[in-house]
Image: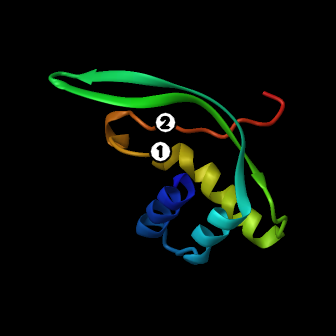
Amino acid sequence: MVFDHWLSKWNKFAPLSLHPDVKRFAEECLAVSRYQLRSQVVRFGPATFIGFVGRCSFRALNRDPYWLRLLHTLAAYSFYCGTGHKTTMGLGQTKVISPKS
C-alpha cells in the first residue's frame, strides 16, 4: 500500500510518469521483513487521528535491478510526499533509513 501511495503521488506531480506495473512488482515481489510499529493518537483541535510510528523494512523477493531502482526512487520520494492521509498537516512523515541505523 505504501508503494502504491508513493507511485500515485509521483505520477500526479512528476513530469515523467512511472509505469503502473511498479505497483504490481511491489505487491508480488516485496515482503515485510521486519517491523517495529506502535499506534499513536494525534489531536488537531476537535479532530482525533489514530496512526502509527516506527520502522518497517522490506525485502525484495525478486532482485530485478530495473524494478528495484524504481522502488528505491519511490522510497526516496516518500520523504517529500509523505505516507497516508493528512500529509499536508504534518502527518505521514517518512524517511529512508540505511540498514546500519
Badge 1 marks a residue whose secondary structure is: loop
Tell me if mark 2 has few (under 14), some (14-19) or many (20+) residues whose alpha carbon lies within 10 angstroms of its own: some
Image quadrant of residue 3?
bottom right
Residue contact at pointers 2 and 1, CB within 8 angstroms: yes
Q: Nearer the viewer, residue 48 or 76?
A: 48
Extreme residue toward the left, this view: 46
Image quadrant of residue 62?
bottom right
- Vertical placement of 46 versus 34: above or below? above
Which residue sits at x=62%, y=64%? 27
* Mark 2 → mark 1, Cα distance in angstroms: 5 Å
Which residue sits at x=49%, y=63%? 10
Tell me if mark 1 has few (under 14), some (14-19) or many (20+) residues whose alpha carbon lies within 10 angstroms of its own: many
**Is 89 displayed left or right of 34 in the figure?**
left
Image quadrant of residue 28?
bottom right
**Is 59 displayed left or right of 18 in the figure?**
right
Return the x and y of residue 33 as percentages of the image width and height.
75, 43
Which residue sits at x=54%, y=38%? 94
Badge 2 marks a residue whose secondary structure is: loop
Which residue sits at x=55%, y=76%? 20
Q: Which residue is mark 1?
A: 82
Return the x and y of residue 31 as percentages of the image width and height.
71, 52
Q: Which residue is mark 2?
A: 93
**Label whose residue precedes the other's in the sequence (2 or 1):** 1
Return the x and y of residue 22 as percentages of the image width and height.
62, 70
Number of disc labels: 2
Which amino acid, mark 1?
Gly
Which amino acid, mark 2?
Gln
- Vertical placement of 2 versus 11: above or below? above
